[in-house]
Amino acid sequence: MIREEARVLKADEQWLTVDIVRTSSCSSCHADNACGTASISRYFNFRSPQLKVRNAINAKQGDLIVLAMQDSFMLKGSMLLYLAPLICMMLAAVMADLLFNPEKSSELLTVVAGLTGLIMGLLLARKLSNGMIDQSTVIAESIIQTHSRPVTFV
């Protein structure tokens, strides 16, 4: 099981709306200046994903909880995210190379077709992934810390 911490934004008897607590080891790593991931994360402000999960642990607004997800779900999602765009890009490039003048193939046309296939693959992965996650995929496992005061938004 993969576990992640989340803060409860809204709670009722049946459902929780939670905000995933972003954790990163970038601040403790010595290769911070040479790391591409750290550089990208400094320039982009990624939103924390919010999920709706069943309230099986009687959590309240403001509580810090642990969410759990099956390893197999993460593996399927990763394969979809990486393989669908890659396969679409390669298929589009090969098809463009074979269909448009196989003897005098233009590299520019092949590159454009490959990029188009990549974009189509990303859109396909996004469409297919929308149906993957449901309320039974992620489980509220336990409460780490309770808060009696509600969460306020600035």
Image (cartoon, grey):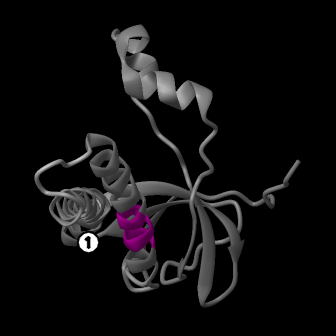
Residue 123 horizontal/vertical position (percent)? 45, 68
Front residue of this view, candidates 131 and 118: 118
State which region is magenta: 120-126
**Residue annotated with mark 1:** 73
Observer-nearest of 96 and 35: 96
Magenta stretch: includes residue 125: yes
Q: Main secondary structure of the magenta part?
A: helix
In the displayed structure, 69 sits above or below 105; it is below
Spot occupied by residue 2 in the image (x, y as percentages of width and height): 28, 60
Q: Is residue 51 left or right of residue 116?
A: right
Query: Is label 1 in a helix, a strand or a loop?
Result: helix
Q: Is residue 80 above or below residue 41?
A: below
Kind of residue indicated by mark 1: Phe
Residue at 49% x, 28% y is 40
Furthest residue toward left: 103
Question: Which residue is located at x 59 percent, y 44 percent?
Answer: 46
Q: Residues within 10 Å of mark 1 (few under 14, many from 20)?
A: some
Residue at (47% x, 39% y) in the render: 23
24 in relation to 79, above or below:
above
Residue 23 included in the magenta stretch of the image: no
Foreground: 141 or 50?
50
Measuring from the top left, give residue 134's x and y in whole percent: 44, 84
| Location of residue 67 by image quarter | bottom left
Q: Quadrant of residue 62?
A: bottom right
Q: Is residue 79 above or below residue 52?
A: above
Side of 91 relative to 128 (left or right): left
